[in-house]
């Protein structure tokens, strides 16, 4: 395309010369002219010339003014002066103000080449301007991107560490201006947290050695706040491989760090709770549990230390019992007025106490109590057992402010779980104590005595020594107990227990076997001849202090039986039985102290063996119930059952009551067996009703000893509360029982009837009760004794008695039942006498539960 040329020349002839020279150089030309300022501006805008040729002196305005206008309106268009009068000074000025070249009119042959050079220069300048503009835009874009990043971007000189660039984000994250960073290259290191400076310095040195720089650290800003920074950097090298600068990107990761810390804390808390709960389930000893809890709190929970302190009974001091962590336990007991005051405050608060800045705590007592070395925060959590603060769990942390609300809530829950475990341990210890010790006297019971006796016998075998076991009871104890009351009797037993403990020397050699019977072991004997002397000395020590009651002094006396190892027995059970046999013999003969001998009455030994077997049978529940039906004479239907105890004796078989009941009542074991019989009968009745079977009322015999127990009615009510009404229970009491204490028996039987339990008067006709008393008795049924029934068909007197009892029962509106009916003739006679019910083998003997169910299904 032709070159567009704008001519600023006053003379048209000179302009033609210029054009002619350009054409001669074979340059296609399109031109226009301008002679003043207005035309120049117009042509620059409308013609858009590619080059401007101007004379220096012109009539309407000079060349420098034209140059200024051209630079203003078309700065990219080359401006050349063509003049014969421009001097060196004006030429230099023209070049400074933007002229591309100047050509003398006397050397116009140079004009084409000057124009080409000017055009090439303009093209290069245009390209440079374009590139500069592009670079500026790129820089602006990069700066905008960097400014929008959440990171601080910076670059520093490798040698001088001078900051070459730092992004504006540094003000938000580091809290200082970009100018401050550029002025002080060491400012960044000053802001690093003191605890992290060593790690950062090592990483920085590693970066300069060619290692990777990528780590998290904390900074402490000028306003005191702390932030976590994730900093990454790399070493930039020159083309020759020399280190040139360090470029880095730093991001504020405080939120992420806090979340990680929270997550780590949650995991730690979860592991802590799991470990503590595992310890609570696994460990059953108080001290071992405290040790395990302290260990877990430190190893899993991450605390610096933990201690457990027991509160003294007087609540005046703490006794440290377990610890874990850097510190050791202080003195066995921590006391002093200041500490006691602090303990009193903690006990009064009864809630967790927290000290998150022990370093500034002014209370010296608190520091001495709760601040082991290195601990900057502490918390004390009270452990309450059975309504009182029994211990404190003290926790320590090397981090001030550690115990925030979440931590306190976690350890509060752990303390609650620990309290529950301590309560269970206390209850278990109490149960263990009750299982092995007599709660009234504090002496070992029969079970523990057997263990101690077995151990002592093993020692005696090794030492080839002798051992004596003495059992004794207090003479006339029952009479004194009846005369002065049960409370006085308990005090008498406690008084005797104190003497027994003193005489035995070691509590493991003494025992209270129940009632007024005590035992003492005398080990390490070498001569049986001296046993009597030793026995008298021990007895004197037991009874050396008189017993005072109501200001009266009572001198107690004892009877004792002694068995020797190995002369009388070589095992604990036999030695025990032989000592009991000797005691029984002493009570029969009136001897004060009696040594066992084989010729002791065999019946006594047999009775003792039976007592031992029965005691074990009760513990092992070797008893079952058989049931004898009660029959309505008119319809021959089963309208009731009597539960009778049977003993399934191992190696013997089924044993009928016979003499068992007498032994059970004499030894008091009936009070252990009786409640089970009631529970079993009620459970059977409930089972039949639940299965939809016809369930008749079940009668249970209650002994005089049972009925006199204060908790009899309470236990009966407790069993009835376990099942819906009716209870289906009836109790049978003997007429002779009522004659012993008519008023008390009448009151208690009245309470039983109010519960909905039937009452039957057994063995009626043998107790000589008056009609007046009989009328007031709260009974439903009169049960004619079997002795009258068996003789009524042969002896008219017995028939008369039976007739009178039946008439009396009807008069008093009581149901009458005849027991022991063996013959059909007896049943027919009883029906004629209008007896309502019978019981006996004429219908069915006492049979097991399964056979009773078969009978009930057909009746």
Image (spheres, rainbow, N blue to C red):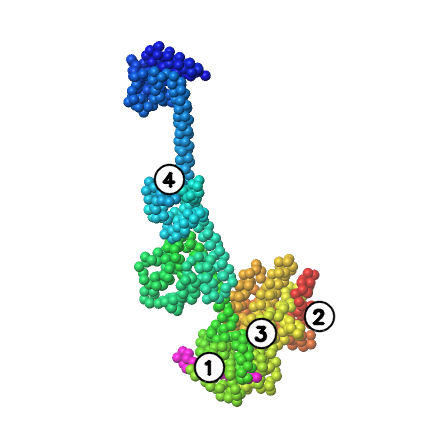
Q: Are marks 4 and 3 in contact (CB under 8 Å)?
A: no
Task: Tell me the crowding category of disc 4: few under 14, some 14 to 19, or many 20 or more residues within 10 angstroms, Cα based.
Answer: some
Q: Secondary structure at mark 2?
A: helix
Among numbered discs 4 and 1, the one appearing first in the sequence:
4
| Separation of residues labelled 4 and 3 (CA atoms) | 97 Å
Q: Which mark is drawn over residue 165?
A: 4
* Residue sitting at x 62%, y 70%: 623
Among numbered discs 2 and 4, the one appearing first in the sequence:
4
Among numbered discs 1 and 3, the one appearing first in the sequence:
1
Q: Nearer the viewer, mark 2 or mark 4?
A: 4
Q: Are marks 4 and 1 in contact (CB under 8 Å)?
A: no
Frontmost residue, 852 versus 439: 439
Is residue 149 shown in magenta? Answer: no
Q: How many marks?
A: 4
Residue at far right of view: 824
Residue at far bottom of view: 529
Q: Tell me: residue 22, above or below residue 730.
A: above
Frontmost residue, 181 versus 545: 181
Picture coordinates of residue 500, whole percent (x, y): 47, 80
Q: Secondary structure at mark 3?
A: helix
| Quadrant position of residue 76 | top left
Q: Quadrant of the N terminus?
A: top left
Q: Secondary structure at mark 4?
A: strand
Q: Is residue 776 left or right of residue 306?
A: right
Report the span colored magenta.
547-566
| Separation of residues labelled 1 and 2 (CA atoms) | 66 Å
Picture coordinates of residue 539, whole percent (x, y): 47, 84
Q: Which mark is drawn over residue 615?
A: 3
Q: Nearer the viewer, mark 1 or mark 3?
A: 1
Q: Which mark is drawn over residue 503?
A: 1
Among numbered discs 4 and 3, the one appearing first in the sequence:
4
């Amino acid at each position: 395309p032709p070159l567009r040329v704008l001519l600023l020349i006053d003379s048209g002839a000179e302009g033609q010369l210029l054009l002619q020279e350009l054409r001669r150089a074979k340059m296609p030309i399109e031109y226009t002219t301008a002679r003043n300022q207005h035309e120049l501006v117009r042509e620059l805008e409308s013609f858009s010339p590619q080059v401007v040729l101007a004379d220096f002196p012109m009539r309407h305005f000079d060349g420098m003014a034209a140059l200024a206008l051209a630079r203003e309106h078309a700065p990219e268009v080359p401006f050349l002066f063509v003049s014969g009068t421009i001097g060196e000074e004006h030429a230099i000025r023209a070049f400074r103000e933007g002229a591309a070249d100047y050509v003398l009119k006397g050397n116009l042959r140079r004009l084409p080449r000057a124009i080409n050079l000017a055009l090439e220069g303009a093209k290069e300048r245009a390209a440079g301007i374009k590139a500069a503009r592009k670079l500026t835009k790129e820089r602006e874009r990069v700066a905008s991107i960097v400014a929008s990043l959440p990171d601080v971007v910076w670059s520093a000189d490798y040698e001088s560490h001078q900051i070459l660039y730092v992004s504006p984000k540094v003000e938000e994250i580091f809290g200082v201006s970009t100018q401050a960073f550029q002025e002080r290259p060491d400012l960044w290191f000053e802001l690093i947290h003191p605890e992290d400076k060593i790690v950062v310095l090592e990483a920085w040195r590693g970066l300069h050695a060619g290692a990777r720089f990528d780590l998290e650290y904390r900074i402490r800003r000028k306003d005191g706040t702390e932030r976590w920074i994730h900093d990454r950097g790399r070493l930039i090298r020159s083309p020759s491989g020399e280190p040139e600068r360090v470029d880095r990107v730093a991001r504020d990761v405080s939120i992420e760090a806090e979340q990680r810390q929270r997550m780590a804390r949650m995991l730690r808390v979860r592991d802590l709770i799991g470990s503590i709960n595992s310890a609570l389930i696994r460990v059953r000893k108080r001290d071992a549990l405290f040790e395990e809890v302290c260990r877990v709190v430190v190893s899993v929970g991450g605390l610096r230390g933990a201690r457990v302190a027991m509160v003294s009974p007087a609540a005046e001091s703490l006794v440290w019992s377990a610890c874990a962590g850097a510190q050791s336990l202080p003195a066995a007991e921590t006391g002093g007025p200041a500490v006691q005051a602090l303990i009193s405050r903690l006990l009064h608060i009864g809630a967790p106490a927290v000290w998150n800045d022990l370093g500034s705590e002014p209370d010296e007592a608190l520091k001495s109590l709760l601040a082991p070395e290195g601990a900057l925060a502490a918390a004390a959590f009270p452990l309450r057992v059975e309504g009182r603060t029994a211990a404190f769990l003290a926790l320590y942390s090397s981090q001030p402010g550690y115990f925030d609300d979440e931590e306190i809530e976690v350890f509060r829950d752990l303390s609650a779980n620990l309290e529950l475990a301590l309560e269970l341990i206390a209850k278990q210890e109490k149960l263990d104590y009750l299982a092995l010790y007599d709660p009234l006297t504090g002496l070992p019971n029969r079970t523990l005595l057997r263990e101690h006796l077995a151990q002592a016998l093993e020692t005696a075998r090794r030492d080839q020594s002798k051992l004596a076991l003495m059992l004794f009871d207090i003479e006339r104890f029952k009479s004194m107990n009846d005369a002065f009351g049960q409370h006085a009797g308990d005090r008498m037993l406690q008084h005797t227990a104190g003497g027994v403990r003193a005489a035995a020397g070691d509590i493991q050699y003494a025992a209270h076997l129940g009632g007024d019977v005590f035992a003492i072991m005398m080990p390490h004997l070498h001569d049986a001849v001296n046993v009597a002397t030793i026995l008298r000395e021990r007895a004197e020590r037991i009874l050396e202090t008189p017993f005072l009651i109501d200001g009266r002094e009572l001198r107690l006396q004892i009877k004792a039986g002694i068995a020797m190892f190995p002369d009388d027995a070589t095992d604990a059970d036999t030695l025990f039985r032989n000592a009991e046999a000797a005691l029984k013999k002493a009570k029969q003969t009136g001897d004060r102290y009696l040594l066992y001998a084989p010729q002791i009455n065999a019946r006594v030994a047999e009775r003792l063996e039976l007592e031992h077997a029965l005691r074990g049978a009760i513990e092992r529940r070797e008893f079952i119930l058989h049931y004898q039906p009660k029959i309505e004479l008119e319809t021959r239907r089963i309208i009731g059952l009597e539960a009778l105890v049977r003993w399934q004796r191992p190696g013997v078989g089924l044993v009928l009551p016979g003499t068992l009941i007498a032994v059970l009542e004499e030894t008091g074991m009936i009070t252990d067996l009786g409640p089970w019989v009631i529970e079993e009968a009620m459970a059977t009745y409930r089972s039949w009703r639940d299965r939809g079977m016809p369930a008749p009322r079940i009668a249970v015999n209650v002994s005089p000893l049972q009925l006199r127990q204060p908790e009899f009615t309470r236990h009966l009510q407790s069993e009835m509360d376990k099942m819906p009404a009716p209870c289906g229970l009836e109790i049978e009491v003997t007429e002779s029982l009522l004659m012993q204490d008519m008023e008390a028996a009448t009151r208690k039987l009245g309470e039983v009837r109010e519960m909905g339990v039937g009452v039957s008067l057994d063995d009626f006709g043998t107790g000589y009760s008056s009609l007046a008393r009989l009328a007031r008795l709260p009974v439903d049924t009169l049960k004619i004794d079997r002795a009258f029934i068996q003789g009524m068909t042969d002896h008219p007197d017995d028939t008369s008695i039976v007739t009178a009892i039946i008439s009396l029962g009807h008069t008093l509106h009581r149901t009458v039942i005849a027991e022991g009916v063996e013959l059909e003739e007896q049943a027919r006679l009883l029906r004629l006498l209008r007896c309502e019910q019978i019981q006996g083998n004429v219908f069915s003997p006492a049979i097991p539960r399964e056979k009773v169910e078969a009978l009930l299904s057909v009746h």
